[in-house]
Amino acid sequence: MNEQSISLHRHELYTLVWSEPITRLARKYGFSDVWLAKICRKYNIPRPGRGYWARKKAGERVPIIRLPKPADNPVIEIITHPEKPKSSGERKGNPFVDRIPRKIVVPAELTHPHALIKETAQILASSRENDSGILTPSKGGGLDVRVSKECLDRALRIMDTLIKALTEVGFTISVSGGATLVRVGDVSLKISLQEELKRKRLRAAEHDLDGYYRFGYNLYADRAVPSGSLFLMIDDQEVRYHMASRRTWRDSETRRLEDCLRSFIYGLIKAASIKCNLNQKETESNQATQNSSEDEASEHV
């Protein structure tokens, strides 16, 4: 089996546990239900009780236990062992798998950067930060990289390493309308690298106290600020609601984003396969509609 990892926020794991039986999750992701139960206990995540799924299948309205302390939302890394394809027939649909480098290392310094990295670095170096502290390009062009000034160097090194690895696999990377596009076979996918935001509490002294008094004034207020944690995302609308597996790879307590690039490339290949199938179904549907219209027209002649 191939070892992979999934990084989920606590509330995401909670949603997953209540979406389908644990035994089914175990088969899908390659971990045991006993192990998952331990993770849920560790992070205080409630699970469906005995008989929940049977009662729900019977049509009963079974109450869901709410997540305790929803604001406590750390990133949880889950090591999975998905089964390898049993036949070479499945691999024929993904000819890029064997080309993925065995080891992808992000260097400590940016050397011989890709042309797109050079362009992005120049654009973001002269960009201003928005209200949340994220660099906002003042002009078009460049990769879809949304990070703070403090994380810019790291983000560029990660993207440079990723682009070079994608090129080695046989993908084509381009920029269009502010989006980063990866061409995988016959389809293109949008990807982005972003920095997560966290909430920062402001004291009253930092409030703007000028003007009229407003009812409900709070001594404290929250503001979104950069967290220093980065994540890569397959940000493609067409496959977003058809991917049962992960679309986001992020920093966690036990693993940095730099160590997730191979897994991200696997995710791109899977997303491309899904998008290709969707396009094929749409083409077949349009063709069937056209044939039906032609048949109706011939009947009226």
Image: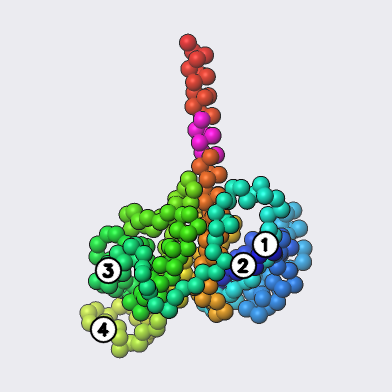
How packed is label 3: few (under 14 Cα within 10 Å), some, or many (20 or more)?
Answer: few
Identify which residue, 277 or 3, lies in the foreground. Answer: 3
* Residue indicated by mark 4: 209
**Three-letter code for the amino acid on which mark 4 is drawn:** Leu
**Three-letter code for the amino acid on which mark 2 is drawn:** Gln
Q: From where the camera sits, is residue 296 visible?
A: yes
- In the rendered structure, which disc, 3 or 4, sits on the residue that comes first in sequence? 3
How packed is label 4: few (under 14 Cα within 10 Å), some, or many (20 or more)?
Answer: few
Q: Residue at x 52, y 24 (%)?
A: 291
- In the rendered structure, which disc, 1 or 4, sits on the residue that comes first in sequence? 1
**Three-letter code for the amino acid on which mark 1 is drawn:** Pro
- In the rendered structure, which disc, 3 or 2, sits on the residue that comes first in sequence? 2
How packed is label 1: few (under 14 Cα within 10 Å), some, or many (20 or more)?
Answer: some
Q: From where the camera sits, is residue 196 visible?
A: no
Secondary structure under badge 2?
strand
* Residue indicated by mark 2: 4
Which label number is shown at residue 185? none
Separation of disc 1 and disc 2 at Cα? Answer: 8 Å
Does the magenta segment cover residue 284? Answer: yes
* Residue indicated by mark 1: 82
Q: Position of residue 260 (x, y in %)?
A: 53, 69
Separation of disc 1 and disc 3 at Cα? Answer: 41 Å
Relative height, residue 212 to residue 185 (above, below): below
* Residue indicated by mark 3: 122
Pointers 1 and 3 in contact (C-beta within 8 Å): no
- Number of numbered callouts drawn: 4
Separation of disc 1 and disc 4 at Cα? Answer: 56 Å
Separation of disc 3 and disc 2 at Cα? Answer: 35 Å
Q: Residue at x 64, y 74 (%)?
A: 45
Which stretch is magenta?
Answer: 281-287
Secondary structure under badge 1?
loop
